[in-house]
Image (tube, rainbow, N blue to C red):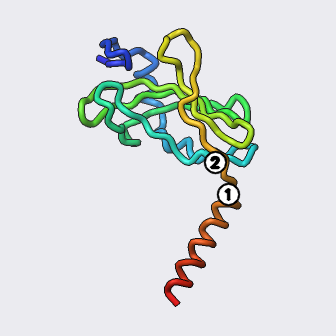
Amino acid sequence: MNKNTDNKLTAISEEHRTLLKEGAPLSTFFPVKFTNGAVADNLHCSCGNCGKRIDDERTRFEGHTPNPDLLDLRGVGVCRQCSVLTPFRYRVRARAKLFQIEGPSPKGDGSWMVWRLRPARPAFWNIIGWARYLRRYLHAKA
């Protein structure tokens, strides 16, 4: 049985069975680099029953990129603590100088809501940040 986010027990669908057999762990879809320079490093799943984080090796997803600025993910995860299967649906999308993570609205009306909005940080700025950190560290050692 599957417990969804509405706390109702439902049967495991054929789609869920297919994802469990043929899907890939969620981490295989990351990092995602968008045309605006944003990089989405990772995404984590939480159990719909107990709220604990689901280990990556216990998730199975399929992903599609209908365009270069959108990653559409559909998957399932099995919680190590309570053994409940939770379905997931995410969209990771580039927006201006940001990227956002979207998911289905809890209203159940087919609409989507933004869960997390993050600033784009091009790889160049990551390198600059590490260079500054290293310079301060080496200067402190001298």
Residue 82 is situated, as x and y percent measured from the top left of the image, at 24, 30
Residue 32 is situated, as x and y percent measured from the top left of the image, at 62, 44
The 10 Å Cα crowd at callout 2, few under 14, some 14 to 19, many 20 or more, is many
The 10 Å Cα crowd at callout 1, few under 14, some 14 to 19, many 20 or more, is few
Outermost residue on the left side: it is 82
Q: Which residue is found at the position 59% from the left and 37% from the top?
A: 117
**Sequence-earlier tag: 2 or 1:** 2
Residue 125 is situated, as x and y percent measured from the top left of the image, at 68, 60
Secondary element at image label 2 = strand
Mark 2 highlights which residue?
A: 39
Say above or below: 16 vs 109: below
In which image quadrant can residue 72 be found?
top right
Q: In which quadrant is the N terminus drawn?
A: top left
C-alpha span from label 2 to label 1: 8 Å
Say above or below: 13 vs 122: above
Residue 86 is situated, as x and y percent measured from the top left of the image, at 38, 25
Say above or below: 37 vs 64: below
Q: Amino acid at mark 2?
A: Val
Q: Which residue is found at the position 36% from the left and 41% from the top?
A: 55
C-beta proximity under 8 Å, tags 2 and 1: yes
Residue 123, disc: 1
Q: Amino acid at mark 1?
A: Ala
Outermost residue on the top side: it is 109
As drawn, is 108 to the left or to the right of 39? left
In which image quadrant can residue 12 be found?
top left
Secondary element at image label 1 = helix
Q: Which residue is found at the position 38% from the left and 33% from the top?
A: 46
